[in-house]
Image (cartoon, rainbow, N blue to C red):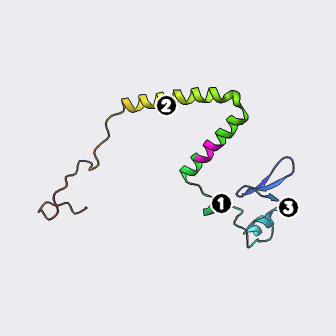
Amino acid sequence: CSHIRCPCGTHSCYLCGKELDKKKPYDHYKDGHLGGGQNAKNSRCIVYGTPAWANKTDAQLRQDAEKALQQYLEENPDLKDVAAQSNLVQKKRWEQLLASSPPRPNRHHGRRHFAPGSPRACIVQ
């Protein structure tokens, strides 16, 4: 359910973050009748599930996480050195893993490709 009720008594929408009416929180949603409210035809939010606009790509999620980390480190400058050291350790570990990993297979996965028009030409080109 996209309706959040905080212990302090505040009601919010999980999808958009908007604070909701405490007496009629489900009136915020496009399908508010599912929660006992009225449908809001101009709302982008739904009671159950995640609408397409709220889905983020892996790149967006990574960017959000990096932004949150930077903000946290700005608010806690004493942790910047710890984070920098952690990044160095992780980078070194990745370099070790890459150096010890087996070579990557070729792109053709062992299949032979012949010149177009030859009697043995690959049909998937």
What's the residue at 82%, 59% (across, down)?
Answer: 20
Numbered label attached to residue 49: 1
Exactly how many numbered labels are in the figure? 3
Alpha-carbon neighbours of circle 3 within 10 Å: few (<14), some, or many (≥20)? few
Q: In which quarter of the image is the C terminus?
A: bottom left
- Label 1 is placed on what type of residue? Gly
Determine the residue positioned at 69% across, 37% down: 72
From what the image shows, is residue 64 above or below residue 125? above
Q: Is mark 2 on a helix, strand or loop?
A: helix
With 56 as the anchor, is 8 left or right in this view?
right
Name which of mark 3 and mark 1 comes first in the sequence: 3
Compared to residue 101, the image places residue 66 above or below, namely: below
Residue beneath label 2, please? 91
Q: Do the residues labelled 3 and 1 touch (CB within 8 Å)?
A: no
Name the residue rendered at 67%, 28% in the picture: 79
Which residue is denoted by mark 3 in the rendering? 21
- Say whether marks 3 and 2 touch (CB < 8 Å): no
Mark 3 vs mark 2, CA separation in Å: 48 Å
Who is closer to the viewer here, 77 or 2? 77
Q: Nearer the viewer, residue 113 or 80?
A: 80
In magenta, the rendered stretch is 63-67
Q: Nearer the viewer, mark 1 or mark 2?
A: 2
Left or right of 92, for residue 17 = right
Left or right: 10 as drawn, with respect to 74:
right
Name the residue: 58% across, 51% down: 60
